[in-house]
Image: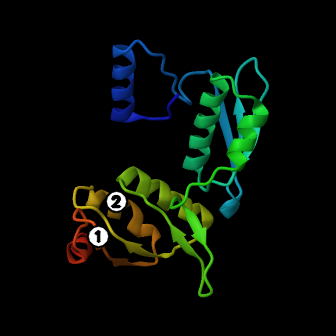
């Protein structure tokens, strides 16, 4: 199962053909549909629907439409491997992904942590922040080899301001002055 699109999907299809493996694409193949309803910072409610089989409703604490879709993909794989509806729902409810739209409460206000590391992830983060109705101040650090312009283009319009920084122990970290100059 995948929800990949564009060149990533093309590469997955090529590789699946090369190793004679099945590949199902969520939303394109009619093996499953996903409905998701956001619960704000509490995550999402998801229903996986498969023709001729009972629906699988579950909740996940992961925040954002992209994470609901990822949880649905994981649920489909688990079901294909013989997992029960109960086990899938329990696992989804217990899921945590530190550093991915993780909200940490602080006396001066909540802090949101996210490791968006490419333009697609930055766009998903920006979309979720927009849906949540927040425009936080960002503290951004990026590795030199990343698509810095693409990340900033996707994310900056949703931020209420931002500071450039870097991971001091990473030799790959982009200098904050260079990061600020791109933005």
Residue 173, picture quadrant = bottom left
Q: Nearer the viewer, mark 1 or mark 2?
A: 1
Q: Is residue 84 depicted above or below 21 in this figure? A: below
Quarter placement of the C terminus: bottom left
Foreground: 71 or 30?
71
Q: Which residue is mark 1?
A: 169
What percent of the width, then of the height, locates residue 77? Answer: 60, 29
Please tell me which residue is depicted at 42% across the width and 35% down the height of the picture: 5
What percent of the width, then of the height, locates residue 179? Answer: 25, 71
**Residue lying farthest to the front in this orientation:** 169
What percent of the width, then of the height, locates residue 98? Answer: 54, 59
Q: Is residue 6 depicted above or below 179 in this figure? A: above
Please tell me which residue is depicted at 69% across the width and 43% down the height of the picture: 91
Q: Residues within 10 Å of mark 1 (few under 14, many from 20)?
A: few
Number of the label disc, if any, that sits on residue 151: 2
Residue 51, picture quadrant = top right
Q: Is residue 136 depicted above or below 20 in this figure? A: below
What percent of the width, then of the height, locates residue 75? Answer: 65, 34
Q: Is residue 92 depicted above or below 98 in this figure? A: above
Side (left or right) of 106 relative to 53: left
**Residue lying farthest to the top in this orientation:** 20
């Amino acid at each position: 199962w995948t929800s990949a699109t564009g060149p990533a999907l093309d590469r997955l299809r090529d590789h699946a053909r090369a190793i004679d493996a099945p590949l199902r694409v969520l939303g394109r193949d009619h093996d499953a549909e996903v409905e998701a309803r956001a619960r704000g910072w509490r995550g999402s409610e998801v229903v996986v629907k498969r023709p001729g089989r009972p629906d699988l409703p579950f909740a996940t604490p992961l925040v954002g439409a992209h994470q609901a879709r990822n949880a649905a993909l994981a649920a489909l794989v688990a079901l294909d491997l013989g997992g029960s509806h109960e086990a899938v729902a329990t696992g989804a409810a217990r899921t945590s992904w530190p550093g991915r739209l993780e909200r940490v409460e602080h006396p001066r206000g909540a802090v949101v942590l996210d490791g968006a590391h490419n333009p697609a992830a930055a766009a998903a983060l920006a979309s979720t922040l927009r849906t949540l109705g927040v425009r936080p101040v960002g503290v951004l650090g990026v590795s030199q080899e990343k698509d810095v312009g693409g990340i900033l283009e996707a994310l900056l319009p949703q931020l209420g301001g931002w500071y450039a920084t870097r991971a001091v122990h990473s030799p790959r970290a982009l200098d904050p002055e260079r990061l600020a100059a791109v933005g």
